[in-house]
Every structure is written in C-alpha cells, then in structure tokens.
Amino acid sequence: MTTVLKKKLRQQAILRRKAIPPHEREPKDRAIRERLDRIPAIQQAISIMTYISCQGEVDTHALIRQWFAQEKQLFIPRLAPPSPQMEAVEIQDVDRDLRLGSFGILEPLATLPAVEDPTAIALHIVPGVLFTEQGERLGQGGGYYDRFLKRVAPKAPLIALAYEWQIVKALPQESWDIPIPMIITEERVIEATRS
Ligand SMILES: Nc1ncnc2c1ncn2[C@@H]1O[C@H](COP(=O)(O)OP(=O)(O)OP(=O)(O)O)[C@@H](O)[C@H]1O
Ligand SMILES: [Mg+2]
C-alpha cells in the first residue's frame, strides 16, 4: 500500500515539476543558491557530493561551477546497473568528466574510479521529489539514495534542495527511508524537527 501511494505521489509531483517553465524556476534557483551560500556547513565543506539536476529539479549546475571555482572537491553519483548500489566519483571538469548515463542523467565517465570509502566526503546534497518539514523524503523510486546514505559519514551534513511546493504535510515512509535534517527552499531553511 505504501509503495503504491509513494508511486502515485511521485508520478504526480514529477509531472508538475517538469511542467514548470525555466523562467519561473530560475529566480527560485537563485534564491536557493543564495540561501545555501550562507550555510556555514557549506562554506566549511572541503568536499561536496551533489546530484546533477535534470527534468526540473532544483538546479545544481551553477552550484557545481561555483564550488569548482572555490576549489572544493566535487563528487557526483554514478549508477552501475544491475547493482543497486550508487557510487561516488570525484570529477575535475564538468565538460570532460561527465556523459549521459542510465536514466538519461549526466554521470561520471565509467573510466573514473569510484571512491572506496564514502565517509571521506564532507557533505551531501540530496535530491528528492517531495519532502515534509520533519525531513521525510520521497525520492525517484530506485532506493539508491536510501542505500547510499547508510554508507556516508554519520556526521556529514545532508542537505536537500526543494521548491516550496515540494514541501508537503505528510509522506508515506518505510523503514529504510533516510530523513534529511536540512531542506533549503526559495523561501526558507527548514531544519527538520523529528518528533
Ligand atoms: N537500505 C535498503 N536496503 C535494501 N533495499 C532498499 C533499501 N532502501 C531502499 N530499498 C529498496 O528500494 C526501493 C525503493 O525505495 P523508495 O521507494 O524509498 O525509493 P526512493 O527513496 O524514492 O528512491 P531514491 O532513494 O533512489 O531517491 C524499495 O522498494 C526498497 O525495497
Ligand atoms: Mg526512500
């Protein structure tokens, strides 16, 4: 039942997300970026893992360029089907080190090595389709992040980026769903209060 409900919520939200025109998204992406820049954990992080936005997700391309300019170490996820595991791969150059991978998402080249120990990464930017103020997260449905986040450093901050409409009152959650303690929207920073 939970799985069916998650699937329905996910499908509706993804359709809505894709339908938002770029001119509506861009000022919100900028506001999210400015808010994120003021977060001490981001300023202090020497290495960051982030998704590469597509299909109407909160933009991370500008962030990636900015973090490279600030000489932070950048890690990007890579899927290696049929394994259900997601890998973290360090890239040095957005144009040279990425290509279209499974699911039509830009991924690090297969020739680049995955990090052996994801606890080496200081901070994680996590994608999501819908969230609650309690930090509950509905993802794309693969379970990749839920599996991966079990392997990251327990102290590494997890930050999600979302538009205000993606914050909902309640979400179905399952035992493996990993909550995200901080969500940044165009209007506010949500520090999840899990009751
Ligand atoms: N820690 C885990 N161990 C084993 N299987 C898992 C784990 N986490 C998730 N799964 C599997 O992944 C499937 C999808 O999970 P879920 O619906 O929570 O995806 P999601 O959170 O939307 O996706 P993602 O994490 O990729 O953004 C589930 O059916 C579950 O069986
Ligand atoms: Mg999940």
Image (spheres, rainbow, N blue to C red):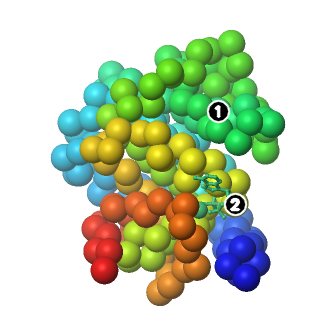
Residue linked to disc 1: 78
Taking the image as shown, residue 193 lies to the left or right of residue 144, namely left
Percent x, y of residue 161 = 45, 58
- Quarter in which the C terminus is drawn: bottom left
Query: In the figure, 162 relative to 151: above or below?
Result: below
Q: Which element is circle 2 on?
A: loop
Is residue 138 among the parts visible in the rendering? yes
Is residue 106 among the parts visible in the rendering? no
Give the Cα separation between the discs numbered 2 and 1: 16 Å
Of all residues, the one furthest to the bottom in this rendering is 169
Q: Which element is circle 1 on?
A: strand
Query: In the figure, 115 relative to 140: above or below?
Result: above
Q: Is mark 2 within 8 Å of ligand 1?
A: yes
Percent x, y of residue 176 = 55, 61
Q: Amino acid at mark 2?
A: Gly
Closer-to-camera residue (157/14): 157
Tell me what residue is drawn at x 38 percent, y 53 percent: 159
